[in-house]
Amino acid sequence: MLTYVHTFINMLFISIVALFPVINPIGSALIVNPYLSQLPDSDKKAAVKKITIYAFSICVVALFAGRWILELFGISIPVVQLAGGIVICIIGWESLSARSDTKTDAKDVESLTNNNIANNVNDKLFYPITFPITTGAGTISVLFTLSAHSSNSDWSGYLINNAAMLLAITVMCILIYFLYGHTKNIVSRLGNEGQTIANRFIAFLIFCVGLQIAITGIKSLF
């Protein structure tokens, strides 16, 4: 019994440590905030709930079936890294080149109804907010690695390891739900100028992260 408990705690610790930097709920919350900041509180809460459910679903599918899905389509993990990196680079570049004229932005926002804003954000909840911003190629790669490690155990060890990994995924999704829902309160304290600086800096980091993921994929391919 003590062996099973030790195995469970060990895998839980490994999974959380491995998933936290690739999901990065704190950094991802700052990246996602511009998408959600225009929504009313009720719509934002519903949007964050959907993002959390999508993220949990992607992680579970990647953990249990991701390897077979990629093999079915003949796609390798380096290709997923390269494609995901390119997409993230595009998102970062679009954010960097976006207009910073707050007056014009305010007029544009006022010309939209709440329903139009909500519909516009809802179209982006899965792509790109959940994938690849929240759970991207790095998350999938880590889950593949953890899954492969678990498959080498006996049946009881396999069940214990998977239970620990599911709990780790649940912990990460709870962090996503909490941080995505409260980022606006943190960012609002920066003021308009502070938000502009933070958004530009984060956009540059997004571009760099995407470039790093793409380069990692290229190195793995060659």
Image (spheres, helix red, strand yellow):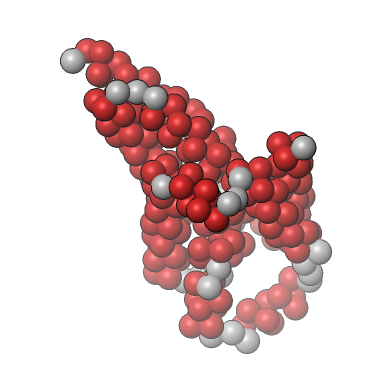
Residue drawn at point x = 25 percent, y = 13 percent: 3
Instruction: Name the side, left or right, on which 168 lies relative to 22.
Output: left
Residue 219 picture location, percent across and down: 76, 36
Out of 180 and 24, give the one closest to the viewer: 24
Q: Is residue 159 visible?
A: yes
Residue 195 in percent (x, y) is at 69, 56
Who's the residue at 38% across and 30% down the image?
151
Q: Residue at x 56, y 59 (%)?
A: 129
| Residue lying at the far right of the rendered structure | 97
Residue 209 falls left or right of residue 21: right
Q: How many marks?
A: 0
- Residue at the limit of the structure toward the left, as seen here: 1
Judge by depth and name the residue closer to the eye, 39 or 169: 169
User: Farthest residue in the top direction?
Assistant: 2
Asked if residue 134 can be seen in this view, the reply is no
What quarter of the picture does the C terminus occupy? top right
The answer to whether residue 18 is above or below residue 26 is above
Q: Position of residue 142 (x, y in %)?
A: 52, 36
Q: Nearer the viewer, residue 49 or 34?
A: 49
**Rendered residue at 49%/28% (across/down):** 17
In the image, 106 versus 132, the foreground residue is 132
Q: Please state, as top left, top right, bottom left or bottom right, where the N terminus lies in the image.
A: top left
Residue 90 percent coordinates (x, y): 74, 59
Above or below residue 149? Residue 140 is below
Q: In the rendered image of this protein, does residue 136 appear above or below residue 54?
A: above
